[in-house]
Amino acid sequence: MIVASRKKKENIAEYLLYMWQIEDIIRACRCDIDVIEKQVVAGYTNLSPEELKAVKEWYESLAEMMRSEGVSEKGHLQINKNVIIDLSDLHARLLKSTREPFYNAAFFKTLPYIVELRTKSGAETVGELETCFNALYGVLMLRLQKKEISEETQAAVKQISHFLSILSEKYKQDRAGELEL
């Protein structure tokens, strides 16, 4: 909760990947708050009792949302889908802007990787940004499992990460009212 709040303010891409990871943690605990409390919340040893209560309530509310939205086994919460929607809207505005040639260049340098990932995954209906996030999350999971990552995938992830870091910075500027398109 505290980490999520900080990430949302500082880097929206990191926030979204973090929230996808939280969704998976909740799934691993079968959306059961007792299991979440024992397996996850108990690990927050540096928090006060009030903070621990808030963390437990946060996980409990997310687990309830996952059950009610039907994403207990797969998929993403609407709050996380909304982040993708917001980023996609900003992405479209940035591409249309004549004031953002650097952003456009970064996107068009990333586009071949997006096309290749879509082709390999068969997820033609998934948007460009979601394809990028799926790739980064997939590599994160491979790293956590200590699995080998090909050089081609590493190159793609490096470019996608660079592109999403630019988008995240533009998102931060937009939210602060500092982005002029």
Image (spheres, grey):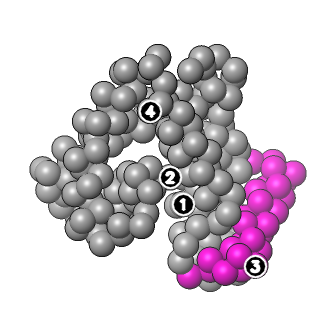
Q: Residue at x 77, y 60 (%)?
A: 58
Q: Residues within 10 Å of mark 3 (few under 14, many from 20)?
A: few
Secondary structure category for the residue under label 1: helix
Task: Mark yes or no: residue 146 visible.
Answer: no
* Picture quadrant of residue 31: bottom right
Pointers 2 and 4 in contact (C-beta within 8 Å): no
Secondary structure category for the residue under label 4: helix
Q: How far apart are labels 2 and 4 at the CA level?
A: 23 Å
Residue 34: x percent and y percent?
A: 74, 78
Q: Amino acid at mark 3?
A: Ser
**Numbered range of the magenta stretch:** 47-73
Pointers 1 and 2 in contact (C-beta within 8 Å): yes
Q: Amino acid at mark 2?
A: Leu
Position of residue 25 in the picture relative to residue 112 (left or right): right
Position of residue 171 in the picture relative to residue 46 (left or right): left
Secondary structure category for the residue under label 3: helix
Residue 69: x percent and y percent?
A: 71, 76
Q: Residue at x 27, y 59 (%)?
A: 117
Which residue does the numbered mark 4 point to in the structure image? 95
Q: Is residue 9 above or below residue 46?
A: above
On residue 93, the disc is none
Q: Residues within 10 Å of mark 2 (few under 14, many from 20)?
A: some
On residue 68, the disc is 3
Q: Front-most of 130 and 55?
A: 130
Q: How far apart are labels 1 and 3 at the CA level?
A: 17 Å
